[in-house]
Image (cartoon, grey):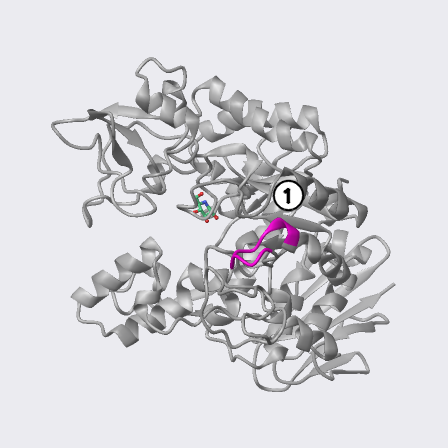
Amino acid sequence: MSWYDQAIIYQIYPKSFQDTNDDGIGDLQGIIKHLGYIKDMGFNTIWLNPIFVSPQVDNGYDVSNYFAIDPILGDTNDFSEMMTKAHELGLHIILDLPINHTSDQHPWFQDAVNDPHSIFRDYYIWHSEIDGHEPNNWGSFFGGSVWEKNPRNPDEYYFHLFDKKMPDLNWKNPEVQKSVADIAKFWLEKGVDGFRLDAFIHIAKANFEQDSLDSSTKFPIDDKFYAKLPAVKDYMSGFVKEIKAFKPDVFLFGEASSAKARDAAEYTRPDEHVCDVVVNSDNYGEVYDDSNPDIPKFFQDRKLSLEMLKQTYVTWESILDHVSLPTLTWGNHDISRVLDRLNLPVHDDKITKLLAMMLFLQRGIPVIYYGEEIGMHGLKYQKVADFSDQRAVDLISNLRQKGFTDKQILRLLNNQDEMTARGPMQWDSTQYRGFSKEKPWNWALVDSNNVDQEIADPDSIMNFYRELLKIKKHDCFTSGDYRLLITDSNIYAYQRKTADKQGIVIANFSDQKTEFTLPKTVWRKVLTNESSEVEDGVVKLGPWGCCALESN
Ligand code: NOJ
């Protein structure tokens, strides 16, 4: 058993957590200020979105220097102070490590562009033009082609899966694998406990000569050419072996947005040397409203399907059983906050508590996005022009052309755009919510509770989360087997079992009262989101009620 088998992860978007130097941008000192809060809430691990030097084209995922902290966030002294204080409190720190690409400002890329004989040429992926245009029709995740012209040689292109200012590294080159391992070891020496391996499933690419057959758009996104190719495992294994040899208990948390349970099992098998757990972005049990073909999937309205959620978790829990732990999450910085995404009522705390209990007591590692523990909602921008991220800009222009009003577009953006999820942490009720004295870098109104209010209210979401995370640490909810129980369609119920202890969780996903008959044994109620009663082995739950019980 490793320390991370009991990890309860708090994801912090450093630019939006706490500003301490009044520039409207969060910083490492802000994180240090709240380490006590994080510990007290019951988290034991912190994942920080990227903090390395970056031109911030993609909020830190475009790194120009992996060996230093971006000055907007602090410096090496702040980093050391954060590590020391976190470790004193028993908190582990995981850094986000973009390994698929660098910034175009990175010295490797600059040298490769400026010197045709550079030793870093082969660190990137180049291709000559074909008949005066891009080598193929593959589409980038950030729009347009994956190919961009070499600024110094217009006959040649470089490859970028994300923004054109984020050239992909050539993982075929062993020097690249070694250089990335050196970066990891540098931070491990500074005490870091693990890494989120950003976009690792994309490090291998197919034959560039093969065009995509998808003719629906000029540059189609076609995963089969650049996601989950067999060579990913080959490229990763040397790198992973090297850093595991350097620090055997390093936690490798692989980001694979499109991974299915079987992919996750493949990557986390202990003999594969890829990663310890996989986090994907598709386990939310959502059904999309695809009735209007003009609206791209990412922005479509969605609602929770309990049936789908059940299928998803039975699949993940079964396939990963005896392989690795699933990650349990309602969202992250790449998707709007769960309460907005699913159009859930703003001030019905019961539902927020139910979502937390239902998910986090399952077998797996909870990954909780900052603010979720107070039921934080996303930012509500006032006009479409307030959105500046590329995906939003493209949506606005496309939908305007198709006759949508700005009001219609604004609704879609406020419900689904990722920037709404990256707003300042709501600490108190002052003008900028205790995040900063200055206007935050990403700012709009948000209808949310704040930490101050919630601390004072014994029935708050925050106090519920604190209790829930205590219970998560009980043996049965950490290491017990998981079994979904067959119930009425509105109930999600599961049992967790170790050799001598068991737990059960029942969640009523409806606004009607309901009852649930417990398996025969003596049960003790440990947490509920409203007054539920247990009488003669039957749990009586009100609308959206949930209840956890234990027995030993
Ligand atoms: C996944 C990250 O979560 C996302 O924010 C980023 O844009 C891409 N990887 C590229 O690094």
Residue 513, placed above or below residue 93: below
Q: Quadrant of residue 383?
A: bottom left
Q: Quadrant of the C terminus?
A: bottom right
Rendering coords of residue 217 (x, y %): 20, 49
Q: Between residue 316 and residue 6, name the one nearer to us.
A: 6
Q: Quick check: 466 left or right of 370?
A: right
Q: Is residue 365 visible?
A: no
* Helix, strand or loop for disc 1: strand
Q: Quick check: 311 left or right of 387?
A: right
Report if residue 28 lies within the magenta region: yes
Determine the residue positioned at 61% across, 84% down. 543
Q: Return the residue at label 1.
A: 94
Name the magenta segment's main secondary structure: loop
Q: Amino acid at mark 1?
A: Ile
Determine the residue positioned at 73% across, 78% down. 456
Point out the stretch of residues depicted in magenta.
21-29
Q: Quadrant of residue 488?
A: bottom right
Q: Quadrant of residue 294?
A: bottom left
Residue 169, placed above or below residue 255: above
Rendering coords of residue 97 (x, y %): 54, 38
Determine the residue positioned at 44% across, 32% down. 203
Determine the residue positioned at 59% across, 54% down. 12
Rendering coords of residue 204 (x, y %): 41, 30
Determine the residue located farthest toward the left in the rendered image: 131
Report if residue 498 lies within the magenta region: no
